[in-house]
Image (spheres, rainbow, N blue to C red):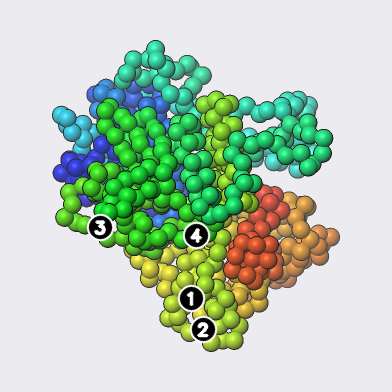
Amino acid sequence: MIKGSNVALTALSEDVGTVIVSLGWVSPTGEGDADVSVLLLDAGGKVRSDGDFYFYNNPVAPDGSVQLLGKTPTEDGNEDRICFDLTAVPPQVERIVVAASRYGGARFGELENVRVRLADAAGESLLRFAIADVDAVSAIIFGELYRRGEEWKFRAVGQGYDSGLAGLATDFGVDIEDDAAEVEAEAASAVEAVEAGDPAGGGQPESVAPATTAPTLEAVPAPRRPDVAEGEPAKRTAAARPRTAKKKVTLPKVTRKSLAENESWREARLFPVSVLKSDRDREMRATSVLLSVMAQVPEFGRRLTAAFGAPSGRTETFTEVSLPHGDTPRRPDGVIRVERAGKLWTALVETKTNGNSLKADQVQAYMDIAARRGYEAVITLSNDVALEGSPLVDVKIDGRRKHKVALWHLSWAEVAHQAQMLIRHEGVGNAAHAWLLQELLHYLQHENSGCHGFQNMGAAWVPVRNGIDDETLCQGDPRALEVVESWERLIRQVCLRMGGELGQKVLPVQRARRGTDPGTRRALLADQLCLDGRLQAELRIEGTPGVLAVSADLRTGKLRTSVEIPAPDQGYPLTWVKRLVRRLAEAPADLHVETLVESETGGPRGTLERLRPEPADLLPRNTAIGITGFRLSLFKGMGSTRGNAESGFIRSVDDAVHRFYTSVVVHLDRPAPRRAAAKETVGAG
């Protein structure tokens, strides 16, 4: 589409009751990002109440019409997805504005390939709009959905704002509390106060509330109360003004003391796993456990199914359903049904556990059954992580059939991630739901459940390692490509686990050129692996000062985790290095610190143990050479086997990233907000 153009959704697809809008961009540095937001507007072009503004502090509509699904990696960056159930949008809403904003003074001009994409409930892309000339704006309206009679249309807008999220929201009538800058300033003051020996940031220490034995979970928006009429916005108190400062999340408090006599007493669990003896037992139990929790915890079920184009409504789940298929009935592992306004959305579920692979003939049969019976989707669930351009199973789609069936995949790591985000960081509606999710998470993480996520580097791992050792691995070898794909799956899983633990966005960084095909990109990485014997990846963790790099050197058997932090804009180099060493007081003594300088040759370097008494050793002898930053690195032996055992490669990568983050990255200063550009733009675009 071009700027200003519009199109009716029914002209693009027959299945547009639910649509998924994806906003995307590419960061050349790997560190840039933006936050999506949605505004529901009435005929006057204003929100009916502050509750019609959805963003990172208010991601879900009570009626299910809007749900921010979060970020997903793509072949050329990341996309932030939003699910709209257009059948649930209140009749008073005439327009839905889809926008994004940058944080901390950053501008969209620092990003590339800024675009919006719209897909139907089956996941088929319907339109794409690329936005140019973003320059110094800090917020952009990408597009809008609007009513015309009985149908919905989409307009490509591409309008920029230099006043950020607060300015955009205020223009549409939101009474917003723009406290982002204030919170950042308070955080910076707190850091300085702690370093000066004043933990409260003032003369008197503040009192700290004692930790409770059962910490209260902050609830997500609850379902609409029966006393609220259909289509009416829920009343909000004056205290509910939307805040631009991102919510602070913390890990749960220490659990209450057990009443068990000794460690041999095992707590009774809702979903026992010790009795599971075979892979079939594990598949049946895992399917039943997951689907039952999805049906009983609406927040969790909706979070998983919204990404698959399901509407918001009453959900029921079933297991071991017999469906006719030729001479032999088929029994999918599960069925998910969502009912809204008399219409049904149905998905068949095929589950694998314990590292077992999906079978193409099974999935093909379920796709055929779904097409004949008018079902909307087939969902596969296994330990594998899906990659763009590399399907886990190949199925044939009969283009002659009018009814389209979407094929989606979930990994067990993604399921655990979503459960962690709800019970540890965002909260659920009541204590019973929190307990159910906790029991589900305990089940998934148990060693006997078979639901541990990606756990095998594949049959090509050992031959490739041997080929690198004896220098016989040649470019173009398909086994190298298999290892690169396995490495990418492993990094995706590491991101999911870290994100669930931290409550922050953790995403792999893609530095591919715009428009690069994912298969071509992986082929280039495979050739590079053959040349230098290294697997490399980068992770962007929200709130950290740099990108966390991971490198596995198959020649030396070493794992390297590192982060580069920029030099401060002000002050003296000696002050910089002293502050850095002081911040790393609790970091491992074997941490390598290297000074990055403007010249091509490297700067001074050394271990933290040697630098602690003499931080000045990090300064170049030639004071005329400018310091651009510092690189911090930890090295660790690499696991050799392809599996997830203690001696396995997968476990060693997980442990290395976890150790580096918890012992090094958490001690570093958060990135300072960037100064706003001097050039002013008003409603650019």
Gap in angstroms between the C-alphas marked 1 and 3 = 30 Å
Of the two numbered discs 3 and 2 in the rendering, the one whose residue sits closer to the viewer = 3
In this rendering, position of residue 582 left or right of residue 682: right
The residue at which mark 1 appears reads as 480
Are dots 3 and 4 in contact, CB under 8 Å? no
Q: Is residue 574 above or below residue 17?
A: below
Nearer to the camera, 10 or 376: 376
Q: Earlier in the sequence, mark 1 or mark 3?
A: 3
Q: Earlier in the sequence, mark 4 or mark 2?
A: 4
Position of residue 45 measured from the top left corner of the image (x, y, whole percent): 27, 26
The residue at which mark 2 appears reads as 473
Could you tell me which secondary element the residue under label 2 belongs to?
loop
**Three-letter residue code for mark 1:** Ala
The residue at which mark 4 appears reads as 356
In this rendering, position of residue 47 left or right of residue 582: left
For the point 81% across and 59% down, the residue is 612
**Three-letter residue code for mark 4:** Asn
Q: Residue furthest front?
A: 327
Gap in angstroms between the C-alphas marked 2 and 1 = 8 Å
Of the two numbered discs 4 and 1 in the rendering, the one whose residue sits closer to the viewer = 4
Position of residue 162 measured from the top left corner of the image (x, y, whole percent): 39, 40
Could you tell me which secondary element the residue under label 3 belongs to?
loop
Q: Is residue 451 above or below residue 190?
A: below
Is residue 538 visible in the rendered structure shown here?
no
Are dots 4 and 1 in contact, CB under 8 Å? no
Position of residue 22 measured from the top left corner of the image (x, y, whole percent): 35, 46
The numbered disc on residue 397 is 3
Q: Quadrant of residue 226?
A: top left
Could you tell me which secondary element the residue under label 4 belongs to?
loop
Of the two numbered discs 4 and 2 in the rendering, the one whose residue sits closer to the viewer = 4
